[in-house]
Amino acid sequence: MTHFTERSSRGSKHSLVFHFLIFTSILSASYSIQLRSKVEKLEEEIINLRTTCESQDGVSNNDIEALQGEDYSSFYLKNADSRNIALYSAVLAPIMPFLFYKYLDYLARKNNKEEVLLKRIAYMVDVFFSSYPYAKLLALLFATLFLIGFGGLALYAVSDASFPEALWLSWTFIADSGNHADRVGVGPRIVSVSISSGGMLIFAMMLGLVSDAISAKVDSLQKGKSEVVEKNHILILGWSDKLGSVLKQLAMANKNHGGGVVVVLAERDKEEMEMDIAKLEFDFMGTSVICRSGSPLILADLKKVSVSKACAIIVLASDENAIQSDAYALRVVLSLTGVKERLKGHVVVEIRDLDNEPLVKLVGGELIETVVAHDVIGRLMIQSALQPGLAQVWEDILGFQNSEFYIKRWPQLDGLHFEDVLVSFPDAIPCGVKVAAEDGKIKLNPDFNYVIQEGDEIIVLAEDSNTYAPGPLPKVLCKGSCPTLIDLPKHPKKILLCGWRRDINDMIKVLETFVAPGSEVWMFNEVPEKEVEKKFAYGGLNISELENIKLVHSEGNAVIRRHLETLPLETFDSILILADESVEESIVHSDSRSLTTLLLIRSIQSNRLPYRDTRPASSLRAGFSHSSSIREMQHASDKSIVICEILDSRTKNLSSLSTICVYVLSDELVCMALATVAKDRQINRVLDELFDKEGNEMYIKPAEFYLYDQEEVRFNEIMMRGRERHEIVIGYRLANAECAIINPPDKSKPRKWSLGDVFVVISSGYH
């Protein structure tokens, strides 16, 4: 009933409007016809007057000529029919749409179709305006032409102007509403005011369209919807907390080339992305960062960022769990393979789980280079725990601030033994060869008798690609000989893994290959012991097959002090604080948990160390101030190695961490690897060789392997002595220094060494 009432009221309103328009049109037509009758009567009177004047002799010829000069009758007589047609057309033109509407409405009611035809017409108009971008402009143009034509007809009907002149007057009234002020007569004034009113409406619509177009363009620019016209740029797909570190590394890589262009495509607002990037605390050094909002899964969005012209594409892992993140990365790779234009550059994909790497490579084919973040960090944690300082070496090599790997061909070295090539670069250290005869196979630390062949490329550590070149071989190089040492047997280690990682199975397998028989690996986490056995079995780890390691599991919460106090923390050689799997999705939560565990472990260790009971009274009276507690923790750090996994690189920069923790590993190392492989995909094969447990790896070895105490030797000579041990010596760390020096300058300058120094080498084993 309510619906029927609403329809009745709506129909009555439409009927009133319709009848009002008809009444107005009829009134205007009647008035126009009345004016036309008056004009015709005046024309007849003028004709009669001229006839009378011509028949009378008292009228002079000048008067007759004057009447003839004002002879309007012939003009009106000739154009009476056309002006009448114009008048009727101008009157009927506004009425016809309403008559057509009423006719359609009548047909709909008669056939009981409930305005189906009208809805169909409305639907077609709606589709036209929504489908065609220039529909509004075309509608405005049509309305303008209609008003010019309608106004021209009306002016032609009520004035003495010709039809072309009437059309021109109609346009002037539309373009400038003040032009109708000099019109004379009721009819011309009514028509001119109507045309001017329509002109004001049209120009208002035009201003609205122009304003909407400008606003839409500005909004498109602000939201990052416009196309990026770049080439040879680096494209980053996705957004994560690692983005800042990746941009920092790319900026440093582009510094020597005057900068570059990095384009970021993510499903975030462009303004938010630009604000977050602006908050990064480093200089981009000429590199410009362009943000675009869109999805890497949509081909149109990929085309918008010139994906086919990018020299490298980095696919960042999302901040979700490993399964969802790798699934998203796989979908992105599928989208990239669907790009019609062939990709110019390679694709570097960050994988969270090592088990998903083969599938991504299978889908992407030869375009794909993968960096398994979790595996890289886990392996580096183990190496750093067994060899303190190695993580800092990796940070120097992977980053672009110091020396990094480069691969280049030098034809002048063809025919030389690798031993001679080793000392032929004054500003670089050759580490291996990319063998052309074996389809570009990477050989680090090649054999003694290897000879450089045509097409071979040399792998070096250098500061930049344009800072090194081979020079003449040293004329006299007295390398001496390495001290004769008997390899001491490895001692069993006691290691604590605090927390649970997805790849803890792989970490234990790596430890099995590094440690001596009789070593113990304690695992302290919140996973029940029965669940641990299931997780090991699910991951393919058979505990009974471990020969060098004895696993000890202890259940507890690493952020609760009384749980940690149940462990013999003062007896461990190395403690690895892992980013627990349960909180890895939240970087802030994970880092807070790791730092809390670190502080609790150091505090418990400092309370248990024997030096605490023999301190002087003055030290005891100092109380538990911040400085005294840090000093006690620092003493505890001398007794055991603690490697702490930190996800946020900004947390790593806390000054107090360096005093209580041997080293802090963060995702910044993964970002360095991503940027390095993005700049040169060949480096990924070098990194795979160094991370492979069966290949050559980096080690930190004591100076007694290469020289005698206080012996004065050039670094070049130490490199040659290293070849006797089938090693590549790439740097050193002095006894009183905190950081190692990779690819040292002045390699031919003699230096006095001590047995407290250590050397960084690439070797196939620790021997």
Image: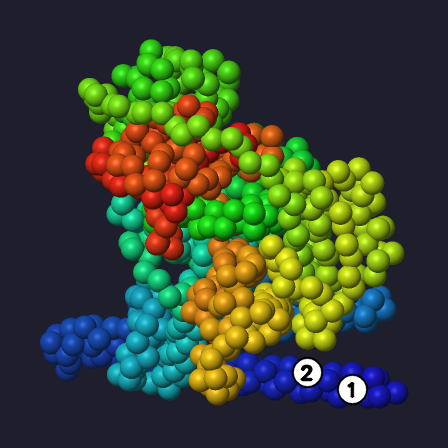
User: Is residue 350 visible from the viewing direction of this image?
Assistant: no
Give how far across and how far down residue 270 sits, in percent: 47, 64
Mark 1 is surrounded, within 10 Å at the Cα level, by few (under 14), some (14 to 19) or many (20 or more) other residues, namely: few
Q: Residue at x 56, y 47 (%)?
A: 386
Nearer to us in this view, 104 or 750: 750
The local secondary structure at tag 1 comes to helix
Tell me how far mark 2 sits from mark 1, CA to CA: 12 Å
Which residue is label 2 attached to? 14
Q: Which mark is residue 440?
A: none
In the depicted structure, whether residue 508 falls above or below residue 172: above
Q: Amino acid at mark 2?
A: His
Please count the marks in the image.
Answer: 2
Q: Amino acid at mark 1?
A: Glu
Give how far across and how far down residue 105 sits, in percent: 74, 71
The local secondary structure at tag 2 comes to helix
Labels 2 and 1: the sequence-earlier one:
1
Q: Residue at x 48, y 84 (%)?
A: 617
Q: Residue at x 71, y 65 (%)?
A: 567
Q: Are marks 2 and 1 in contact (CB under 8 Å)?
A: no
Q: Residue at x 62, y 43 (%)?
A: 491
Give how far across and how far down residue 742 sits, in percent: 36, 42
**Quarter assignment of residue 572:** bottom right
**Quarter assignment of residue 744:** top left
Nearer to us in this view, 476 or 555: 476
Which residue is label 1 attached to? 6
Nearer to us in this view, 68 or 475: 475
